[in-house]
Image (spheres, grey):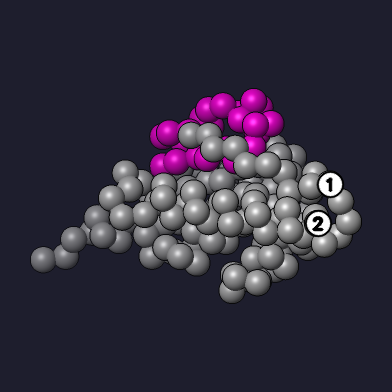
Amino acid sequence: MNNNKSLIKTRILFICTANAARSQMAEGYLRARDGDRYEVFSAGTRQSRVSPRAIEVMAERGFDISGHVSKTLDTFTGIPFDLAVTLCDNAHAVCPIVPSAKKTIHHGFADPHLTPGDDAEILEGYRRVRDEIIRWIDTTFGPGSPY
C-alpha cells in the first residue's frame, strides 16, 4: 500500500530582518539535516545579501550556503507554509503572523553582525549564533517534533 502522506514535506519559512545570516543559516542547516522531511525557505523583511561570514561559519561545519540569495517576504506572497519562524525581534515586530503560514512562532537570536570587536571577534559572534541556531533546530525539529 502506498502511503502518500510520507511524501508530503512540512514547508517551513525562516525569517529575519535582511535574510543575510540567521535565516540563511537556519535554512541551510535544516535543509541539509532533514531535507527529506522538510521543504525549507528563508526570507527577510528587507533584502540584502547573504553575509560572507555566515557562509564561512556554515562551511566550517560542512554546510554550503554559498549559493543562497537574500529574498524578501514578497517573494513568497500567496505560497502556503506549515510554519513560519521569526528569528529576530525586528522581524517578529514587523510580521508577528505570516498570513500564508498555518502557524507562526518566534525564537530570537542575536544579530551576529552587531558583535563588537575586530574581525576575529565578529566571526566568533557568527559562530556562536550558528551554534545556537543548530541547537535550537535540533531540539525544535528533532524526534517527536510536532512539525
- Compared to residue 62, the image places residue 52 above or below, namely above
Is residue 85 a member of the stretch shown in magenta? Answer: yes
Q: Quadrant of residue 120?
A: bottom right
Q: Secondary structure at mark 1?
A: loop
**Which x, y percent locates residue 30?**
49, 58
Q: Position of residue 20 (x, y in %)?
A: 72, 51
Q: Nearer the viewer, residue 135 or 4?
A: 135
Q: Which mark is residue 33?
A: none
| Residue at x-position 43% and y-position 33% | 103
Residue 61 against residue 78 in the figure, above or below: below
Q: Is residue 46 left or right of residue 59?
A: right
Residue at 84% from the left image edge and 46% from the top image edge = 116
User: Mark 2 and mark 1 in contact (Cβ < 8 Å)?
Assistant: yes
Mark 2: give few (<14), some (14-19) or many (20+) Cα within 10 Å: few
The residue tagged with tag 2: helix, strand or loop?
helix
Q: Mark 2 = which residue?
A: 121
Q: Quadrant of residue 74?
A: top right
The residue indicated by pointer 1 is 116
Q: Magenta region: which residues?
A: 82-104
Judge by depth and name the residue closer to the eye, 103 or 136: 136
Most distant residue in the left direction: 1
Q: How many marks?
A: 2
- In this view of the protein, can residue 110 be seen by the observer? yes
Q: Residue at x 28, y 50 (%)?
A: 144
- Please tell me which residue is depicted at 56% across the width and 46% down the height of the picture: 14
Res. 27 in view: no
* Residue type indicated by callout 2: Glu
Residue type beneath disc 1: Pro
Above or below, 132 relative to 119: above
